[in-house]
Amino acid sequence: MAQIMKMVAQRFALGFLTLFVVSLIIFLGIELLPGDIAEEILGQSATPETVAAFRRELGLDVPAHIRYVEWLWNMLQGDMGRSLANKREISELIGLRFGNTLFLAVTAAAISVPLALTLGVLAALYRYSFYDRAVNVVTLSSISFPEFFVAYILIFFLAVTYPVFPSIANISDATPFWEKVYKVLLPALTLTLVVVAHMMRMTRAAIINLLASPYIEMANLKGLSRARIIVKHALPNALAPIINVVVINLAYLIVGVVVVEVVFVYPGLGQLMVDSVSKRDLPVVQASAMIFAGTYVLLNLLADILSILTNPRLLHPR
């Protein structure tokens, strides 16, 4: 247990260091954007005095390194500032949109995780059969296309040719729960097609690797059915790599939804960030990017911890 706690502390320290580097890159990236933010917001008709006053109001007349320290300190205290576009609290804006992004990610995970595990187990069970080859071809084909292409193909077939689902996933707080689920099914299916191949192939590879183990051979000699050997004996011992790839794909479902949200006009955090970039609402862009980075780092940390808890031998790598 002490070794696990030490490992968790090391991973947390590494995660904070990663977030610090990411925050530096985000701030420098915003600073290096061409043009003057105050002039972009006020327009070309603004007088120099008005632009100078607006820059003072935004704090842009302060040196960059001081603004970075103040921004980082405020972020650590949970103060994300106010939006330049509508003067609302950024935490309020992000809280609502991040909830929608999580809802989409959870819906996609509820479809993709059981589907990928089932496909992977069956592919290992019927290795080198027609089913195995067909599943590999279909999943690898779906992952080879860009997300926007998969999204538009689904819209064409399931919203235009056969109008089963709406092409726009416009939900709000007042939308009833099951109507929300119905409206996000098409973007969730898009994300499922993008991530299911990783999880399916890892499940298949992990189980096939275990099938050559002595205890599996012993189970075969006992006359156990192949399905029971895989489900009862091989799958529990293959959990470490499977959990790792599942959690990493969950991280992708949350932080990689920007394109999908834009295609379906879904009111999530990715759509908010894209809108904020077009409005030059840079505090919202910075805060959104940090939320995405923090979520990705946290879920990767969770993947490491769960992998080691399910297989403590990973604490002693060769």
Image: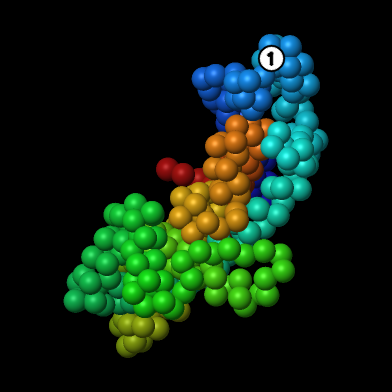
Q: Name which quarter of the figure residue 106 lies in.
A: bottom right
Q: Is the C terminus in the top left, top right, bottom left or bottom right quadrant? A: top left
On screen, residue 231 above or below 69 = below
Can residue 217 be seen here? The reply is no
Q: Amino acid at mark 1?
A: Thr
Residue found at x 66% / y 38%: 284
Residue found at x 48% / y 71%: 166
* Of the pair 102 and 174, the residue shown nearer to us: 174
**Furthest residue to the front?**
45
Q: Position of residue 292 (x, y in %)?
A: 59, 44
The tally of labels here is 1
Q: How is the image coloured?
A: rainbow
Q: Name which quarter of the figure residue 172 lies in.
A: bottom right
Q: Position of residue 36 (x, y in %)?
A: 60, 18
Residue found at x 60% / y 46%: 272
Q: Position of residue 4 (x, y in %)?
A: 64, 48
Can residue 67 be seen here? The reply is yes
Q: Is residue 172 left or right of residue 314?
A: right
Q: Is residue 138 left or right of residue 270?
A: left
Crowding at mark 1 (Cα within 10 Å: few <14, some 14-19, many 20+):
few
* Mark 1, secondary structure of its residue: loop
Q: Which residue in the structure is indicated by mark 1?
A: 47
On screen, residue 14 above or below 212 = above
On screen, residue 235 above or below 298 = below
* Of the pair 29 and 194, the residue shown nearer to us: 29
